[in-house]
Image (spheres, rainbow, N blue to C red):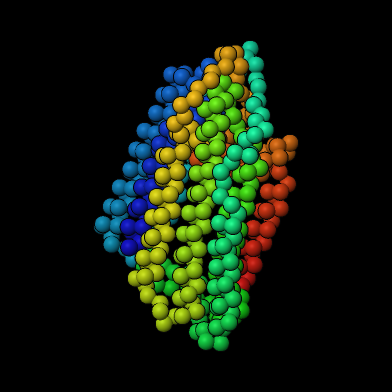
Amino acid sequence: MAAIIFIVMLIFIIAIQAFLPKFLKESEAFGIYIPDTHIKDKRLVHMKNRYTQLVLTSGIMILAIFIGWLWLLRPAEEPIVFAGMVAQIGALIFSMGLYAKNHITLANWKKTEKWTEGQSERKVVDLQFREQLKLLPSIYFIIPMLITLGLGILGLSQYDTLPNQIPTHWGPSGKADAFAEKSWGSVSALPIMTLVLQGMMLFFNGAMKQSGAKIQVRNKKRSREQQLAFRKYSSWLLFVVTITVTLLMGYLQLTIIYPETMSASVTLGFTLGFLFVILGAVLYYTVKVGQSGSRIPVAEQDVSPEDVIDIDDDQYWKFGLFYVNKNDPSILVEKRFGIGWTVNMGHKGNWIFLVLLVGSIFLIATLL
């Protein structure tokens, strides 16, 4: 079963990485802002197609080697897990290495050929945008947290009846393969971990409302509608992740409280269900929405004069992956290369959040 799980995950990673340029806005490629005058540049089109071909080819090779190794050696579960992780990391390293090469090449083209020279840069500010957002209310994320809190209290209330060894990890087969001595901390670790994950989803859902909208100056109506849809689908994706995490972690907490109900097959079913729901939701989100909602069909069009372009903010994007702008009040910003969101590392609120997150992880580790 471990082999099947890692094969599915590897296929997913390879496919997403290979076809990622197809789901991004035309105005951004490999972490570089592309003005409207150059989005149809044949060199850029060739670069995107070449990236897809190379990542797909290398990924198929890695997948073939992994499957061949499984078929020839019939290894045990532990080596499969290790090899599967190595295969995934290898696929990601290759794709990011190719991204880095294309990023540098594209940045040099843009600089030496002065792509934005002679054009007026403008930024669209829509004061009504936040009022029309359709994000899920915070209560959708708070209720799962209350359920987790209840399970945590239930576990503590049954402390005397719990076994001396508390499961802390479950393998791909659904069986517990790591344990800790019973203590108040080990019994509480799983609910605390779940609350941290749920809290992150709640935080991100709220942060999206405060994030500035990147409305294109030459296509204001279309990009505005796409931005609204992008945030709505992002909020629903966070909710799906929250519910899925709550169900899996809640079941595992119940197996600790009532070990006689423990079933490796049911645990495996919950694990596989979690995996396929998460991967399916991310895939649907990627294909349906795209970067910044660019794949959402919108009928309205309003094209401004050709000498007007969006603000070139490449200076705030470090290698096209990390956004650092202390003057931007947004905690979350849309990714330059990828689907979804990333944090504004210039916002002090993110560093406070990071300290709290690391502190929570350290607390959980000390409880086990």
Q: Nearer the viewer, residue 3 or 323?
A: 323
Q: Position of residue 282 (x, y in %)?
A: 44, 47
Q: Quadrant of residue 357?
A: bottom right
Indicate left or right for 262 with 126 as reference. Answer: left
Q: How many marks?
A: 0
Up-down relation of residue 247 to residue 306 (above or below): below
Q: Is residue 231 visible?
A: yes
Up-down relation of residue 318 to residue 356 (above or below): above
Taking the spot 45% from the left edge, 43% from the top edge, the residue there is 285
Q: Position of residue 247 (x, y in %)?
A: 47, 64
Q: Quadrant of residue 264?
A: bottom left
Q: Position of residue 134 (x, y in %)?
A: 56, 43
Up-down relation of residue 309 to residue 193 (above or below): above
Q: Position of residue 334 (x, y in %)?
A: 57, 38
Indicate left or right for 355 with 166 as reference. Answer: right
Q: Is residue 108 visible?
A: no
Q: Quadrant of the C terminus?
A: bottom right
Taking the spot 43% from the left edge, 49% from the top edge, the residue there is 281
Taking the spot 61% from the left edge, 44% from the top edge, the residue there is 208
Q: Quadrant of the N terminus?
A: bottom left
Q: Nearer the viewer, residue 86 or 350?
A: 350
Up-down relation of residue 156 to residue 325 (above or below): below
Q: Nearer the viewer, residue 12 or 24?
A: 24
User: Which residue appears farthest toward the left when viewing the image?
Assistant: 72
